[in-house]
Image (cartoon, rainbow, N blue to C red):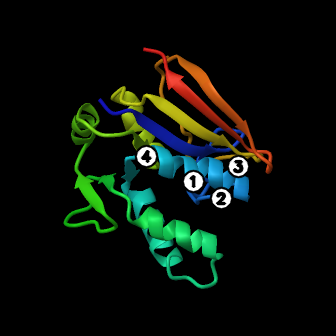
Amino acid sequence: MRKLIVSQCVSLDGFTTGPAGDFVPPPWSDEVAAKWSGWAMETGDLFVYGRVNFEYMKGFWLDAEHNEAMPQDMRDFAVAYNRRARVVVSKTLSGDPGWNATLLSGIDQLAALKAGPGGDMVCFGGANLAHSLAEADLIDEYRLMLTPYTLGGGKKLFDSDRRRDFTLTELVRTDVDSLILTYARKR
């Protein structure tokens, strides 16, 4: 059985987006690139998205591959990242989503993939997908980048009244004052 890891940036006050639903990028450095994005490329056998984050990331990374205004190392990363297999969980998308993605219409299809053979699944899906995965009890780990700012509103990553226990398995302090925290589910 595969492990499902939710990988998400979270503000100090617990939000994954700004008050208007906007993506607020975390502070970035070469160290963060290696320990956050590099980790995902090493760990993830399959990347998992919800529709909103999928559409945003697809547009950004497909453009980054050919955008000469981007640093070369970022364009090189985009080439490798764009080739990776991914799934998008959506009830509103139809047809071929592109970007090496397979469309899944629900969490039950993702649960079936998780129960099958293969490496770890890394979910960049956004808060809505994370809420659905938590409700279905499919999350094995959270890998969170705790950012050194507050947002004052937006989408919360944790939106459940159920208690679930976790163990801190890794803590990385970055050179831009973010923390990368990995919590494994106690089962």
For label 2, the crowd category at 10 Å Cα-Cα, with few meaning under 14, some 14 to 19 and many 20 or more, is few
Counting residues from the start of the chain, the first of labels 3 and 1 encountered is 1
Alpha-carbon distance for marks 2 and 1? 13 Å
Left or right of 52 on screen, residue 67: right
**Where is the N terminus found, in terms of image quarters?**
top left
What amino acid is found at the position of numbered circle 1 in the picture? Ser
| Three-letter residue code for mark 4 | Gly
Mark earlier in primary sequence (1, 4): 1
Q: Nearer the viewer, mark 3 or mark 2?
A: 2
Name the spot of residue 86 as percent of width and height, x first: 34, 55
Give the residue number, with chain letter if any, for mark 3: 151
Question: Is 9 placed above or below 93 here?
Answer: above
**Residue at (39%, 39%) from the top-left corner?**
120
In the image, residue 69 lies at what x, y percent?
A: 64, 83
State if disc 3 and disc 4 touch (CB < 8 Å).
no
Identify the residue under disc 1: 37
- The residue under label 4 is 44
Q: What mark, if any, has residue 25 been given in the picture?
A: 2
Apparent side of residue 143 relative to residue 48 in the rendered image (left or right): right
Q: In percent of the image, x 68 and y 52: which residue is there?
A: 32
